[in-house]
């Protein structure tokens, strides 16, 4: 969600926001808010994903913020939850579903409200936490959770808060909710004051019951417990979320974290990259010990970073 590729913004809309900022930062914050919160256009199911998408068992997923859709593939006793990001959908995980289902896992995922086949036109970030909690109640405990982009951050948050999963694979993650606001403000060109007003209004509207939502949605300041294993996969050429976000998460989680950096895949294609599929499969099967044992740290010119320097 962080940059222009994830938020439908026209040059005209950006120009209006910047002009409003010259008059009043508060006005600029109000004008730009719909751009930040938009989940449109809805991502379509790509041809390469359609077979997996159409063979899933589907059920409604009723949430406080609207109605999503829950998906299920396979019938194994070990269950893996897949969590898409902003303007994403469950079908993006088709390559991972194929890989893990062949290994005997049951895969479950959801489309958030206003995403994929979910209902409605708007939703908010905290809906992801509600969705993960609902999926945990229905399908948990999980062998692992695999999250992409915003879905990776919320997966880390959910496990930190008690959702049962011994390991999390975070693909192209953001390290904090604040990053999304800062990246958006930077792209639009909002003044520091306008960006601050926008963040405060969002906090009041969405997180009024949170004492400190920015700490809650910050997996560096508030990492997972040391007994939870973390795999991070990020492409150096990701134009939406900088690879340094994964590096920050890797540093915060210490010895129980591994970081795989790829090249040339970008933000979305990394989900289907061979390096990603190999690393995620080994990690789900056996944790970071399996990654180290299988020497996934040497795939072509890429490497898994076993310690942050």
Image (spheres, grey):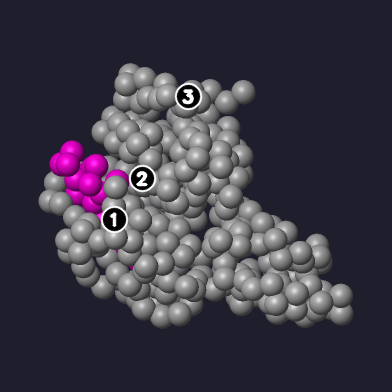
Secondary element at image label 1: helix
Secondary element at image label 3: loop
The part of the image, by quadrant, that contains residue 231 is: top left
N-term mark: 2 or 1:
1
Q: Is residue 208 visible?
A: no
Residues in magenta, as a range: 96-111
The part of the image, by quadrant, that contains residue 293 is: top left
Secondary element at image label 2: helix
Count of picture labels: 3
Q: Are marks 2 and 1 in contact (CB under 8 Å)?
A: yes
Q: Residue at x 38, y 40 (%)?
A: 273
Residue that carries the numbered disc 1 in the rendered image: 48
Residue that carries the numbered disc 2 in the rendered image: 272
Q: Position of residue 180 (x, y in %)?
A: 61, 58
Distance, label 3 to label 2, CA atoms, is: 18 Å
Q: Position of residue 106 (x, y in %)?
A: 19, 49
Q: Are marks 3 and 2 in contact (CB under 8 Å)?
A: no
N-term mark: 3 or 1:
1
Distance, label 3 to label 1, CA atoms, is: 27 Å
Q: Residue at x 37, y 62 (%)?
A: 89
Residue that carries the numbered disc 3 in the rendered image: 301
């Amino acid at each position: 969600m962080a940059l222009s590729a994830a938020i439908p913004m026209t040059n005209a809309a950006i120009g209006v926001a910047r002009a409003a900022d010259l008059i009043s930062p508060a006005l600029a914050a109000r004008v730009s808010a719909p751009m930040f919160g938009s989940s449109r256009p809805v991502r379509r199911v790509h041809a390469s994903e359609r077979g997996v998408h159409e063979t899933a068992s589907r059920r409604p997923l009723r949430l406080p913020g609207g109605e999503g859709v829950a998906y299920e593939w396979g019938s194994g006793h070990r269950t893996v939850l897949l969590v898409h990001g902003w303007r994403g959908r469950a079908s993006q995980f088709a390559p991972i579903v194929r890989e893990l289902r062949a290994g005997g896992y049951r895969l479950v995922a959801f489309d958030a409200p206003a995403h994929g086949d979910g209902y409605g036109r708007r939703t908010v970030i905290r809906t992801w936490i509600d969705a993960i909690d609902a999926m945990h109640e229905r399908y948990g405990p999980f062998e692992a959770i695999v999250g992409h982009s915003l879905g990776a951050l919320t997966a880390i948050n959910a496990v930190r808060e008690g959702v049962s999963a011994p390991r999390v694979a975070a693909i192209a993650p953001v390290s904090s909710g604040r990053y999304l606001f800062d990246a958006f403000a930077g792209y639009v060109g909002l003044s520091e004051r306008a960006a601050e007003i926008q963040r405060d209004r969002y906090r009041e509207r969405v997180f009024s019951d949170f004492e400190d939502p920015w700490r809650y949605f910050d997996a560096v300041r508030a990492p997972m417990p040391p007994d939870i294993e973390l795999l991070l996969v990020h492409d150096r050429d990701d134009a939406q979320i900088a690879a340094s976000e994964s590096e920050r998460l890797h540093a915060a989680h210490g010895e129980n974290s591994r970081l795989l950096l790829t090249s040339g895949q970008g933000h979305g294609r990394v989900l289907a990259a061979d390096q990603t599929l190999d690393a995620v499969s080994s990690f789900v099967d056996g944790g970071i010990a399996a990654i180290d044992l299988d020497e996934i740290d040497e795939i072509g010119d890429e490497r898994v970073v076993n310690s942050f320097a």
